[in-house]
C-alpha cells in the first residue's frame, strides 16, 4: 500500500494527527533547546551594560513626576542604550535560527527599531526637524563613527583587512543613490528662492507673493518626497532580493584561517564560498523566545518563542522610554542652550550605537564583510526604508514630513557618503582609514554644536 501524508512513520500504527494545541505545547516547551529560565538568564544578565536597565523605571518616575528636563532627558537617554543592545541581541539570535531570507527581513524590521520608534514618536508629536535630524544622525554615526571605530580596531590587530569589493561597492552605490535623493529636494527648494542682498530674506523668483510661492514650493516638495519615498521602498525590496537570493554569494565572506599568533590569512581561493561553509557561533537563544517559531537548525540556548517575546517586550519598553525622551527634548534644549539639531544628529544616534558594537568585535576578528554589513547596511536601511516609511506614514496621518533637509545637513551627508565610498572601493581597510572617518564625524559634531 503506497504511503500517503496520513501514513504513520513507525510500525504502521494508526494515530490521530497532532492537534494544534499539542503543536503549541511543543512550541512552548522548545524541547532540545534552552529552557526559558536559561534563555532569559543569558538575555538579561549576559552583559554588564544591562545594569543600566534599572534607569528605565527611574525615567518613568522622572517623566510622570515632572522632574527637571535635563534629568528626564538624561535618564531616558541612558535607559535606551541597553534596550538598543537587547534588540540587537534578540535579532542576532533569531538570525542564527532562521534562513538567510527570513533573517534579512527580520534585521530590516528590528535592526533599526530604536530609530523607527523614536522617529514615529517625534513625527506624531509634530517634531519634524527632530525626525530629520535623528535619521540623518543615525546614518552619519553608522558610516563614520561605528565604521571608523571598526576600521581602527581591526587595523590595530591586522596591518590590512580585506573584504569583498563587489558587495562593498554595491552598498556604497546604493548609499550614494539615497544621498542623491535627499539632494534633489534641497536643489528644488533653492531653485525656487533667491537671497535678497539687502536683508537676506528669501524672495520668490516666480510668484511676487512669497506666501503663495512658499505654498507652491511646499506642495512641490511634498510631491517629490512622496514619490521618491515610494520609489526608494521599491529599491530597498529589490536590494533585499539581490542580497539574500539572486546574488547572495557576493555577500558571503571568504573563510579565514586563524594562526597561533592570532594573525589572520584570507583563503587563497578567489571564488565565493557556499553559505554552509561558514561556521557560525552557536546561538544563545532559541527561536521562540527571541522571535518566531520553533526552528531546529542550530543548537541554541534561546528558543524561538522566547525570542519572540523578547523582541515584543523590548520593543514596547523602548517605545515608552522613547516617548519620555522626546517629551523632554524641547525643555532640555532650552535650559542647556543646546540646539535641537545637535541633540537629534549627535546625541540620539549615540543611544543606538551600543547595538553596533558588534561591528567593532567583528573587525577585530577580521570579519570585515559582517562589519560593513552592519555599518553600511544599517545606513542603507535608514536611508531607503526607514526615512521613506516615515514620509509615507506622515502622508497618511496628516503630518507633513518631506525629504527636504537643510542645505548644511545635505552637504554634510554628501561629503560623508563620498568619503566612505572612496575608502570602500579598493576592498581593503587599515587603522588610518578609521582615523579619517572618526575625524570627519568629530568635525561634523563640532559644527552642529556651534550651529
Image (spheres, rainbow, N blue to C red):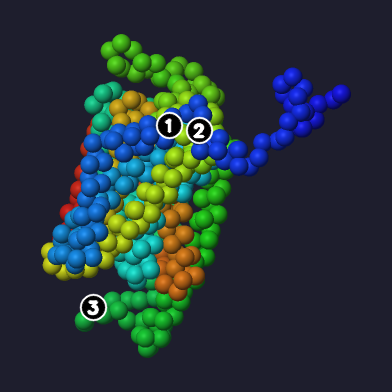
| In-front residue for pair 277/422 | 277
Q: Nearer the viewer, residue 45 or 207?
A: 45
Looking at the image, which residue is at 26% across and 66% down? 327
Q: Quadrant of the C terminus?
A: bottom left
Say which quadrant the N terminus sits in: top right
Q: Extreme top residue here? A: 260
Q: Which residue is rendered at x = 32% and y = 76% of the image?
A: 194
- Residue 281 is situated, as x and y percent measured from the top left of the image, at 41, 25
For marks 2 and 1 on the same chain, the one whose residue lies earlier in the sequence: 2
Q: Quadrant of residue 99?
A: top right
Residue at the image position 60 percent from the left and 38 percent from the top: 23
Task: Return the residue at label 3.
Answer: 200
Residue, disc 2: 30
SS class of the residue under badge 3?
loop
**Structural distance between the alpha carbons of marks 1 and 3:** 67 Å
**Left or right side of 19 for 257:** left
Amino acid at each position: 500500500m503506497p504511503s500517503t501524508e496520513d501514513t504513520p512513520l513507525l510500525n504502521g500504527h494508526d494515530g490521530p494527527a497532532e492537534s494544534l494545541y499539542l503543536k503549541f505545547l511543543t512550541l512552548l516547551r522548545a524541547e532540545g533547546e534552552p529552557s526559558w529560565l536559561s534563555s532569559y538568564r543569558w538575555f538579561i544578565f549576559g552583559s554588564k551594560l544591562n545594569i543600566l536597565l534599572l534607569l528605565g523605571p527611574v525615567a518613568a518616575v522622572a517623566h510622570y513626576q515632572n522632574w527637571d528636563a535635563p534629568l528626564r532627558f538624561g535618564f531616558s537617554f541612558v535607559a535606551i542604550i541597553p534596550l538598543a543592545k537587547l534588540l540587537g541581541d534578540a535579532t542576532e539570535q533569531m538570525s542564527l535560527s532562521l534562513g538567510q531570507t527570513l533573517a534579512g527581513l527580520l534585521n530590516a524590521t528590528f535592526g533599526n527599531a530604536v530609530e523607527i520608534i523614536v522617529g514615529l514618536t517625534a513625527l506624531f508629536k509634530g517634531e519634524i526637524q527632530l525626525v530629520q535630524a535623528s535619521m540623518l544622525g543615525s546614518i552619519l554615526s553608522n558610516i563614520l563613527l561605528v565604521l571608523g571605530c571598526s576600521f581602527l580596531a581591526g587595523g590595530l590587530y591586522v596591518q590590512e583587512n580585506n573584504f569583498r569589493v563587489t558587495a562593498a561597492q554595491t552598498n556604497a552605490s546604493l548609499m550614494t543613490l539615497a544621498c542623491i535623493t535627499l539632494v534633489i529636494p534641497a536643489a528644488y527648494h533653492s531653485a525656487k528662492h533667491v537671497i535678497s542682498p539687502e536683508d537676506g530674506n528669501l524672495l520668490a523668483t516666480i510668484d511676487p507673493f512669497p506666501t503663495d510661492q512658499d505654498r507652491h514650493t511646499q506642495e512641490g516638495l511634498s510631491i517629490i518626497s512622496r514619490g521618491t519615498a515610494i520609489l526608494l521602498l521599491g529599491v530597498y525590496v529589490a536590494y533585499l532580493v539581490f542580497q539574500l537570493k539572486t546574488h547572495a554569494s557576493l555577500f558571503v565572506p571568504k573563510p579565514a584561517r586563524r594562526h597561533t599568533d592570532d594573525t589572520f590569512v584570507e583563503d587563497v581561493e578567489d571564488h565565493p564560498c557556499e553559505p554552509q561553509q561558514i561556521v557560525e557561533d552557536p546561538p544563545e537563544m532559541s527561536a521562540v523566545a527571541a522571535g518566531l517559531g520553533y526552528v531546529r537548525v542550530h543548537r541554541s540556548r534561546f528558543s524561538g518563542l522566547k525570542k519572540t517575546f523578547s523582541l515584543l517586550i523590548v520593543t514596547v519598553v523602548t517605545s515608552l522610554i522613547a516617548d519620555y525622551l522626546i517629551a523632554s527634548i524641547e525643555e532640555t534644549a532650552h535650559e542647556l542652550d543646546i540646539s535641537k539639531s545637535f541633540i537629534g544628529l549627535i546625541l540620539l544616534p549615540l543611544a543606538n550605537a551600543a547595538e553596533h558594537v558588534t561591528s567593532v568585535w567583528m573587525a577585530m576578528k577580521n570579519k570585515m564583510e559582517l562589519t560593513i554589513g552592519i555599518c553600511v547596511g544599517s545606513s542603507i536601511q535608514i536611508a531607503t526604508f526607514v526615512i521613506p516609511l516615515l514620509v509615507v506614514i506622515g502622508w497618511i496621518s496628516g503630518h507633513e514630513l518631506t525629504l527636504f533637509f537643510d542645505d548644511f545637513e545635505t552637504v554634510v551627508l554628501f561629503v560623508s557618503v563620498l568619503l566612505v565610498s572612496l575608502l570602500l572601493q579598493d576592498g581593503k581597510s587599515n587603522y588610518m582609514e578609521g582615523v579619517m572617518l572618526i575625524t570627519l564625524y568629530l568635525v561634523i559634531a563640532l559644527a552642529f554644536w556651534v550651529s
